[in-house]
């Protein structure tokens, strides 16, 4: 039976980088006889322009019916001044929560060819390959009550709530262990169990889940130490699992170890490994329409989709090899360009990956 993939190019550089990812997707579809059928729709600003809302009901229905979703990026100055309840980013949050995409996977991989692009010393980051598993639909970003008010003495005060249920922790811990199992068999759970009750439950539940994974080496780390260790000795980590807010911060920190946001893909999965795949970066309005954006994060998102939603690890690895090959050839978009390499635009980079893939 054919597999349905919904493509949402989005805004800014979204359509440009997506065009290249679709070239790659079409080629692997033919080459590995994957039986994918692609359909296209709008999300974010493009959806506001077309439907009046950042995520139309019919788009959500298509996303529910699809086997996987590939997203470019949303947002841009054109929609900055509209009613906050229909901002482009609202569409993104809504599709994530409506589809129950609770597990956000963000790899931080430094291709050896790009070791100079990192702000850390090459020897600290060369060969870096970390996977951060972030809980995406719970915790302090969604907790209630939350309130901002003025006290009787006139002082303003505000608070948020950081709730986690046992089942929410258990399912994300399982994703962490499952990922560690197919990688380096090491899982570091990050929390703040010395202070927070929610973290104490987090740690206890992770310990319980660990009993089902005797082959995975589990460690725990406080989030402040984890932030420090990520810049001191990042290669000590294989898979890290953590809550929504800690994961938000640590995954951005980890992504910058690799020097370029234009290289990093991500996946957000539900309980059945149905996923939405997207580059970690935004819609880059400052370079939109110029044909210079790096399409590799989106192309590598296709690779993650093949691996996690379709168990096509051979085709996924082929895409990763093709990307590595074009980097070996010295081809670089502006964001990763350095002296001695050849600067190319978005389409030329996509074409080079397609060519490399064809010749594998
Ligand atoms: P951004 O990631 O879009 O851009 C940050 C910087 O990185 C810019 O200088 C940009 O030119 C550069 N950059 C990003 N992707 C690149 C690529 N593929 N190739 C080359 N350079 C690249 O972040 P921002 O500027 O803070 O946000 C711009 C818009 O994107 C905002 O509307 C924001 O809300 C939105 N945004 C969307 C997502 C998403 O769709 N998931 C994520 C973050 C930000």
Image (cartoon, rainbow, N blue to C red):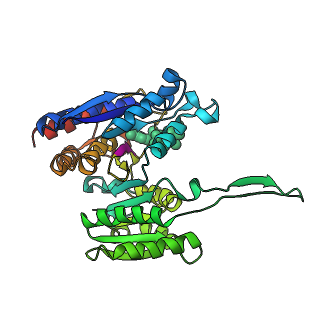
State whether residue 188 is above or below residue 355.
below
Q: Is residue 277 magenta-colored?
A: yes
When the figure is inspected, residue 48 is found, relative to residue 5, above or below; the finding is above
- Asked whether residue 55 is in view, the answer is yes
- Assign the C terminus to one quadrant of the image: top left
Query: Residue extending furthest left?
Result: 359
Image quadrant assignment for residue 60: top left
- As displayed, is residue 40 above or below residue 101? above
Q: Main secondary structure of the magenta part?
A: strand
- Any part of residue 13 in sight: no
Residue 121 point in image, percent of width and height: 37, 64
Residue displayed at 44% across by 72% down: 205
Which region is colored magenta? 275-279
Residue located 27% across and 51% down the image? 308
Residue 120 image point, x, y percent: 40, 62
Q: Position of residue 116 (x, y in %)?
A: 33, 55
Residue at (35% x, 44% y) in the render: 277
Q: How many marks?
A: 0
* Foreground pick, 204 / 179: 204
């Amino acid at each position: 039976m054919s597999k349905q993939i919904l493509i949402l190019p989005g805004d800014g550089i979204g359509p440009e980088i997506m065009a290249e990812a679709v070239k790659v997707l079409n080629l692997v579809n033919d080459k590995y006889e994957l039986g994918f059928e692609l359909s296209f729709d709008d999300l974010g600003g493009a959806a506001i322009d077309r439907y009046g809302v950042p995520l139309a009901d019919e788009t959500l229905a298509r996303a529910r019916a699809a086997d996987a979703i590939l997203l470019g990026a949303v947002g841009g100055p054109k929609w900055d001044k509209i009613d906050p309840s229909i901002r482009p980013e609202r569409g993104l949050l809504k599709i994530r929560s409506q589809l129950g995409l609770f597990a956000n996977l963000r790899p931080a991989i430094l291709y050896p060819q790009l070791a100079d692009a990192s702000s850390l010393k090459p020897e600290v980051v060369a060969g870096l390959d970390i996977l951060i598993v972030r809980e995406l639909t719970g915790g302090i970003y969604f907790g209630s009550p939350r309130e901002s008010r003025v006290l009787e003495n006139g002082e303003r005060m505000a608070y948020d709530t950081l709730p986690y249920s046992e089942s929410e922790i258990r399912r994300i811990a399982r994703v962490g262990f499952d990922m560690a199992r197919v990688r380096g068999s090491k899982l570091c759970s990050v929390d703040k169990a010395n202070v927070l009750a929610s973290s104490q439950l987090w740690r206890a539940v992770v310990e319980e889940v660990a009993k089902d994974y005797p082959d995975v080496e589990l460690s725990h780390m406080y989030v402040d130490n984890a932030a420090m260790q990520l810049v001191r000795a990042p290669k000590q980590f294989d898979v890290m699992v953590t809550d929504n807010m800690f994961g938000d911060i640590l995954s951005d920190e980890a992504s910058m170890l690799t020097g370029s946001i234009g290289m990093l893909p991500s996946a957000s999965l539900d309980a059945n490994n149905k996923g939405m795949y997207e580059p970690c970066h935004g819609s880059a309005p400052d370079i939109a329409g110029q044909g210079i954006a790096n399409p590799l994060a989106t192309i590598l998102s296709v690779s993650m989709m093949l691996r996690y939603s379709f168990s096509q690890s051979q085709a996924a690895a082929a895409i990763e090899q093709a990307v590595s090959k074009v980097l070996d050839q010295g081809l670089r978009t502006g964001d990763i360009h350095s002296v001695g390499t050849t600067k190319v635009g978005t389409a030329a980079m996509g074409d080079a990956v397609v060519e490399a893939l064809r010749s594998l």
